[in-house]
Image: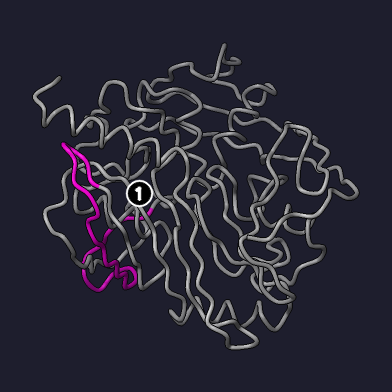
Amino acid sequence: MLALGAAVGYEVCVSNLTPRTFSVPDELDGERLDRVLVALLEDVSRTRVQELIQDGGVRIDGEPPERMSTRVEAGATIELLDVARSRVRYGGVDEAGEAPLVIVHEDEHVIVIDKPAGMVSHPSSVVRGGTLSERAVARFGPLPAPQGEDRPGVVHRLDADTSGLIVLGRSEAAATELVRMFRDRDVAKRYLAIVFGVPRFDTDWIDSAIGRAPGRPDRMSVVDGGQGREALTYYETRERFDGFGYVECKPTTGRTHQLRVHLSSIEHPLVGDRVYRGRRGLRRNIPRGAPPMTRHALHASGLAFAHPVTGERLEFEAPLAADMEAWLVFLREREQRLSAGES
């Protein structure tokens, strides 16, 4: 891993969310305000949502909430106001104490970063400031934007709450070729996930097309044959626990929310996923004493591809994120207690 250089210069950025109004759906009845907003604003990190609440940018039925943990009822109207949050970033570290980007690989054409959970990949209509691509520009200077001027360096993406490896293009030639490589499935991707339920199979394929969820255009779902787009996921069960599984996933396609949707479709939704919960939904129980999991337990652990300019074979791995590692330690210790007949 390459070390980051000394912080140089600074820039002021303003993080805005476009004013919007939502009605709380039935499935989020009684949930905390911050969790409701994370579910409704899937491209916005939980940290940004909490900042918005703290800055007075949220109203519930016209009234400001007392706290971010305020419970909201189905049918309540949530308004997002036009509130700006300014920050000064120094060489990739801002005044809020955000850690510098973890650079796994850097050359004149390609950058590979170990993205933390909670960081949005690129700016969008609802979030600007502090995104991965913006911070990469602050660190590396101007980057090509083959997928749109508001997405510098971006050649693929990870959900905000997915941690792990993400690739950025640093030169025009590399960025264009990387987009093609991801589109044509020339990049091998590996993910680690902690799921509800004990997987039945050691290995299996999930071959189910994915399309927009009926009546919920902001979400994806498995759809009937002839609809949606082809989606293929191979998974291996690494460990089994009482009520849980630790799996490795190797998607061969790259559909939006593919792993979350596929695993949920076989009744193994990700621990911490507030959107794709499977048929049992909120009735899934977290064991007493489990460490916090404030996002879905999915980590992009491995990438392998040919260098887009030199052709050299590149392979990268990212250690499991700390929150997921803590969950595995908890599950292993719990399994030992259960095997010993302890409660």
328 is higher (above) or lower (below) than 30: below
Q: For the view shown, which residue lies furthest in the right direction? A: 9
State left or right for residue 95 relative to residue 245.
right
Q: Residue at x 42, y 52 (%)?
A: 217
Element under disc 1: loop
Q: Magenta span has 240?
A: yes
Residue 285, position in %: x, y? Answer: 23, 28
252 is higher (above) or lower (below) than 37: below
Q: Magenta span has 52?
A: no
Q: Residue at x 76, y 34 (%)?
A: 84
Among the 4 quarters of the image, the one containing residue 249 = bottom left
Q: Residue at x 54, y 82 (%)?
A: 180
Residue 121, position in %: x, y? Answer: 60, 54
Q: Residues within 10 Å of mark 1 (few under 14, many from 20)?
A: few
Q: Quadrant of the C terminus?
A: top left
Q: Nearer the viewer, residue 149 or 288?
A: 288
156 is higher (above) or lower (below) than 220: below
State left or right for residue 305 relative to residue 200.
right
Q: Nearer the viewer, residue 113 or 316?
A: 316
31 is higher (above) or lower (below) than 20: above
Q: Nearer the viewer, residue 26 or 303?
A: 303
> Label 1 amino acid?
Gly
Q: Residue at x 44, y 22 (%)?
A: 32
Region in magenta: 220-245
Residue 191, position in %: x, y? Answer: 39, 59
**Which residue, given by chain and number where applicable, does mark 1 sit on?**
215
Q: Nearer the viewer, residue 339 or 82?
A: 339
